């Protein structure tokens, strides 16, 4: 990891609620270089909240605080909406879970890709259209001109996710956050989409933050892994060293993975311990 | 401040039984309703309407409603005539007070006609399904696609003017949404255990509809009715204004607005005050219905 | 191929439902026609006619036939545009209706434009600033609008803005001096006077139109703004809104381009409903403003027991209703590409 693209330290997010405030993130930290960093954790552990906090996309009611929140040389703490807007899409992009819902159903997908280009690069309609067609081609869409004119509902899940990737990468961001980008897809399509993500991220020298609750997938795909539990990072290690993880929650997760080599009489149950809520040193 | 005593019992997170849970839910809803100032003012207006209608003879002398005193024509509001007098010298205050009775009785009569028709069509449609459902709902859809006010006008014109016919005309055009609602409720209740149990015991369809399904349909139908009240009042007043509703000398508010129309430019109060009464009362029903809906169906608010 | 079959089925269902509603409408008006306590035969032959004359007249009018046959005859007449003759004007009802209807359309369209022009932006602002001042104002305005007797508000408007302040022209469509000055083409006065280049007529017509259109527009606004708000709130919580912001679009663009595009589809229904209720409400508003349109015509007919005219007007408005429903059904697939595959969410 030569150069740090994104740095986070002690990021905290609280949502005000009727029965008191809810701390969704209780001080997480990590640094992302030109690499693929996976974040895993169970539902509700705060993975999406982390991604959205970095992009300045949390609901206005959420309170955000951090010691360090830096994208390259830009300090994101206290950045206003106009400041974030210049970064989003241009320097940091986000791929969401289900292209069926994440694309505007009434606009042609090509126009939605071109819109990112027009917003940030301001080179006019024609240039944006050309760039969008080229972008569609580079995410391995065979007939870009036809897909350009398609509506989201006319595309398969895999195609839709490629469009989503194209839409988020066309303005050339240096960091991409992918929030469960393959969870809504068929198993066979998942691999293709991951391969495209990988290819793009490598070719552009980007940093990728891959959010998932699939430990298998993250271990196979990423360089490093963060394990989150209840708004904290409980484990941070190289993907290849995951087998040697120390935290009991991570160990529990690993033990719960299905293992094709050895049949088990019963599935292990993930035990939880209130102690895990304390900060790890 | 921690709730104590009966409040604690009602507000507990761990109710000791069904009754306590239900009482607690009602109490919570009631508190939410009471904290909504708009809903409370709506409730106040509706209660005031009922009170004025009931106590009308105590608030104003009944004979003042029709008592004509031509020398006192078109007097502006004063101590003797708080709302002024109309073109026949009648006291507008007394007429507005007694008009509350007419408005309330129109609303009540429409409700009494609409509920049986709506339930009578919706319950069997939902319960029996099949071609009965198809025919009844097709009929409902057709009525739903009609211009209601115009149809009510045509009915009223054909039946002849008068309150009773106005009520019938409004009710004949107002039932379809209730049939829809009752059908939807019945569909969701039809497969529940207690209905199946009653069927197994050999209860007749008619009996099941009456004893098992009807009582559970009523609350949502009644909330819907509250929300519709303002519309019913406005339609009735509109018929009155056109001369198709209550006939003179009856102090119906819409008809009173119509009679004040000719003297509007010089004696503004004759038309303004009864119109204000219509507005305030329908606003009251709307505020009340809005508050009720907020509690029972928060998504729609 | 499948899409073609699906489209055909949709069309067939649409035609069937239009036909059923139309038959229902004619049936109900037929029943209304039979309900009148006045004996139409007596009206023709007079109170003291001999029984044989009465019977002959009855047979001539087809009233001795079975009801079902009478209904079929009635249906055939209506399909031929034959609504009978108006007692008051002595003209065929259809001629009368076509003459008065444009005035109603002009007023309703003007009101609708005001309601849409203000109601949609207000509704959108209320949704994007939920709980804020505009949101509260829209809420109050809607409650007021839903509670307002339109005939009364019209009178108050006349009292204040015409009689006291003199900002607008009074009742009617034109001052007496301007009547019959422009040739009738569309029947819409603003349009006809512009076509004829009669600018003073146009200004006068606009001065008369302003108050009723503003009042009706205000009342339509209540419904339009409230519906726009709730549709927009539904859209703003969608994932695509988040994605659009994640790619760097401004909130404004997300709301006014992406969001608005999506609520356009349900708004079509709201617009049709509003237009329909404006046509219906014409009976009251035109009475107040002495606006010589369909509403005033029907009101006069109601009072003179001119049942042919009443029923003709009812059917005309009913047919416009059916047409509006049909139009929204046909517009849906144009605005929503998902509609023709049935893949709407
Ligand atoms: N707008 C909000 N208001 C209040 N609480 C919220 C809000 N958004 C998220 N939360 C809460 O914050 C916690 C973290 O949510 P988040 O969506 O980040 O979890 P996640 O790890 O992405 O889960 P999943 O795997 O289900 O996507 C959850 O308990 C959630 O209920
Ligand atoms: Mg998530």
Image (tube, rainbow, N blue to C red):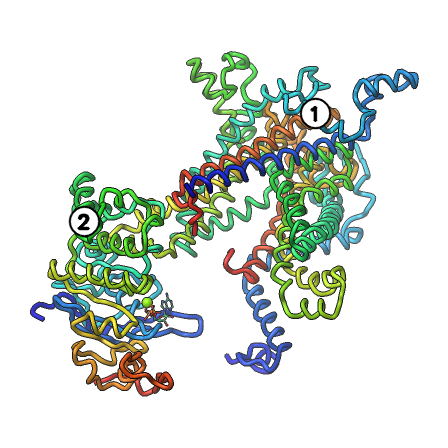
- Identify the residue position indicated by label 2 in the image: A137
Of residues C132 and B174, the one nearer the viewer is B174
- Quadrant, the C terminus of chain A: bottom left
Question: Where residue C104 sits in the image (x, y, percent)?
Answer: 56, 27
As measured in the structure, the alpha-carbon distance from the residue carrying label 1 to the one carrying label 2 is 70 Å
Name which residue lies at 64% across and 35% down: B268
Secondary structure type for disc 1? helix
Mark 2 neighbour class, 10 Å CA radius: few under 14, some 14 to 19, many 20 or more: some
Q: Please indicate whether residue B256 sits to the left or right of residue A23 in the image.
A: right
Q: Which label was assigned to residue A232?
A: none
At mark 2, the secondary structure is helix
Q: Is residue C308 above or below residue A229?
A: above
Quarter holding the N terminus of chain A? bottom left
Q: Is residue A7 left or right of residue B256?
A: left
- Residue C313: image quadrant is top right
Task: Please check whether the numbered discs 1 and 2 fall on a single chain.
Answer: no
Q: Position of residue A58 (x, y in %)?
A: 31, 63
Residue A212 image point, x, y percent: 28, 69
Image position of B222 with respect to C25: above or below: below
Q: Chain of mark 2?
A: A
- The residue most toward the left is A2
> Answer yes or no: do the residues labelled 1 and 2 have beta carbons within 8 Å?
no
**Residue at the disc numbered 1:** C301
In the rendered image, the vertical position of residue B126 relative to residue C258, given as above or below: below
Q: Position of residue A209 (x, y in %)?
A: 21, 67
- In which of the image's four quarters is ligand 1 placed? bottom left
Place residue B65 in its image quadrant.
Answer: top right
Report whether the residue tagged 1 is closer than 8 Å to ligand 1: no
Check disc 1: other Cα within 10 Å, few if <14, some if 14-19, many if 20+: many
């Amino acid at each position: 990891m030569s150069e740090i693209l994104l740095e986070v330290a002690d990021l905290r997010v609280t949502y005000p609620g009727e029965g008191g405030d809810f701390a969704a993130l209780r001080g997480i930290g990590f640094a992302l270089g030109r690499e693929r960093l996976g974040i895993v954790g169970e539902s509700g552990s705060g993975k999406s909240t982390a991604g959205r906090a970095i992009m300045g996309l949390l609901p206005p009611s959420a309170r955000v605080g951090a010691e360090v929140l830096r994208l390259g040389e830009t300090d994101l703490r206290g950045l206003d909406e106009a400041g974030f807007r210049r970064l989003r899409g241009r320097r940091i992009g986000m791929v969401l879970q289900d292209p069926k819902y994440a694309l505007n159903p009434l606009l042609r997908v090509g126009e939605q890709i071109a819109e990112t280009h027009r917003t940030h690069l301001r080179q006019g309609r024609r240039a944006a259209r050309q760039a969008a067609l080229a972008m569609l081609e580079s995410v391995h869409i065979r007939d870009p001109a036809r897909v350009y004119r398609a509506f989201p509902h006319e595309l398969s899940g895999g195609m839709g996710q490629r469009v989503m990737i194209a839409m988020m990468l066309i303005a050339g961001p240096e960091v991409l956050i992918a929030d469960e980008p393959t969870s809504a897809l068929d198993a066979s399509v998942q691999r293709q989409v991951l391969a495209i993500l990988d290819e793009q991220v490598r070719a552009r020298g980007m940093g990728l933050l891959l959010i998932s609750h699939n430990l298998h997938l993250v271990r196979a795909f990423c360089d490093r892994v963060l394990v989150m539990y209840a708004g904290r990072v409980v484990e941070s290690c190289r993907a290849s060293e995951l087998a040697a993880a120390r935290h009991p929650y991570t160990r529990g997760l690993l033990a719960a993975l299905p293992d094709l080599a050895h049949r088990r009489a019963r599935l292990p149950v993930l035990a939880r311990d209130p102690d895990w809520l304390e900060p790890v040193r | 401040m921690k709730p104590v005593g009966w409040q604690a019992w009602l507000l507990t997170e761990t109710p000791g039984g069904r009754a306590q849970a239900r009482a607690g839910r009602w109490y919570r809803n009631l508190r939410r309703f009471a904290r909504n100032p708009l809903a409370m003012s709506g409730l106040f207006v509706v209660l005031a309407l009922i009170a004025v209608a009931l106590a009308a003879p105590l608030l104003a002398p009944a004979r003042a409603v029709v008592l004509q005193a031509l020398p006192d024509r078109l007097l502006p509001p004063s101590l003797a005539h708080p709302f002024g007098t109309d073109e026949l010298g009648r006291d507008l205050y007394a007429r507005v007070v007694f008009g509350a009775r007419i408005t309330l009785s129109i609303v009540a009569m429409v409700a009494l006609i609409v509920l049986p028709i709506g339930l009578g069509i919706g319950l069997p449609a939902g319960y029996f399904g099949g071609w009965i459902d198809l025919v009844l709902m097709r009929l409902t859809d057709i009525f739903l696609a009609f211009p209601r006010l115009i149809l009510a006008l045509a009915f009223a014109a054909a039946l002849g003017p008068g309150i009773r016919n106005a009520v019938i005309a409004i009710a004949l055009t107002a039932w379809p949404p209730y049939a829809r609602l009752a059908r939807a409720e019945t569909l969701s209740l039809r497969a529940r255990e207690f209905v199946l149990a009653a069927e197994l015991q050999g209860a007749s369809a008619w009996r099941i509809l009456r004893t098992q399904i009807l009582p559970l349909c009523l609350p949502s139908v009644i909330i819907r009715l509250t929300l519709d009240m303002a519309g019913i009042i406005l339609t009735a007043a509109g018929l009155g204004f056109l001369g198709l509703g209550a006939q003179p000398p009856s102090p119906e508010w819409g008809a009173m607005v119509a009679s004040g129309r000719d003297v509007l430019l010089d004696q503004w109060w004759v038309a303004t005050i009864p119109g204000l009464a219509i507005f305030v009362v329908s606003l009251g029903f709307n505020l009340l219905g809005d508050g009720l809906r907020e509690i029972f169906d928060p998504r729609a608010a | 191929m499948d899409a073609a079959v699906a489209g055909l089925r949709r069309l067939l269902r649409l035609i069937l439902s239009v036909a059923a509603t139309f038959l229902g409408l004619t049936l109900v008006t037929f029943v209304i026609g039979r309900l009148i306590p006045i004996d139409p035969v007596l009206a023709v032959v007079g109170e003291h006619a001999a029984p044989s004359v009465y019977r002959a007249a009855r047979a001539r009018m087809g009233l001795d036939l079975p009801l079902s046959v009478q209904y079929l005859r009635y249906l055939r007449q209506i399909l031929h545009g034959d609504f009978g003759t108006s007692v008051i004007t002595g003209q065929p009802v259809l001629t009368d209706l076509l003459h008065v209807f444009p005035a109603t359309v002009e007023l309703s369209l003007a009101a609708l434009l005001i309601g849409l022009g203000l109601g949609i932006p207000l509704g959108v602002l209320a949704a994007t600033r939920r709980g804020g001042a505009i949101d509260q104002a829209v809420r109050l305005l809607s409650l007021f609008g839903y509670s307002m007797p339109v005939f009364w508000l019209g009178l108050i408007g006349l009292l204040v803005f015409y009689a006291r302040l003199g900002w607008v022209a009074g009742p009617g469509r034109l001052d007496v001096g301007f009547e019959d000055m422009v040739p009738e083409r569309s029947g819409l006065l603003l349009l006809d006077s512009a076509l004829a280049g009669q600018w003073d007529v146009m200004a006068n017509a606009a001065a008369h139109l302003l108050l009723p259109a503003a009042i009706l527009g205000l009342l339509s606004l209540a419904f339009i703004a409230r519906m726009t708000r709730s549709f927009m709130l539904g859209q703003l919580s969608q994932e695509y809104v988040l994605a659009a912001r994640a790619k760097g679009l401004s909130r404004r663009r997300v709301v006014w381009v992406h969001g608005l595009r999506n609520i356009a589809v349900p708004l079509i229904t709201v617009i049709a409903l509003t237009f329909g209720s404006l046509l219906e409400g014409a009976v009251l508003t035109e009475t107040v403003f002495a606006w010589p349109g369909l509403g005033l015509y029907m009101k006069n007919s109601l009072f003179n027991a001119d049942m042919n005219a009443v029923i003709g007007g009812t059917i005309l408005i009913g047919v416009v209703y059916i047409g509006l429903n049909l139009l929204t059904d046909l517009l849906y697939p144009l605005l929503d590409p998902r509609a023709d595959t049935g893949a709407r969410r």
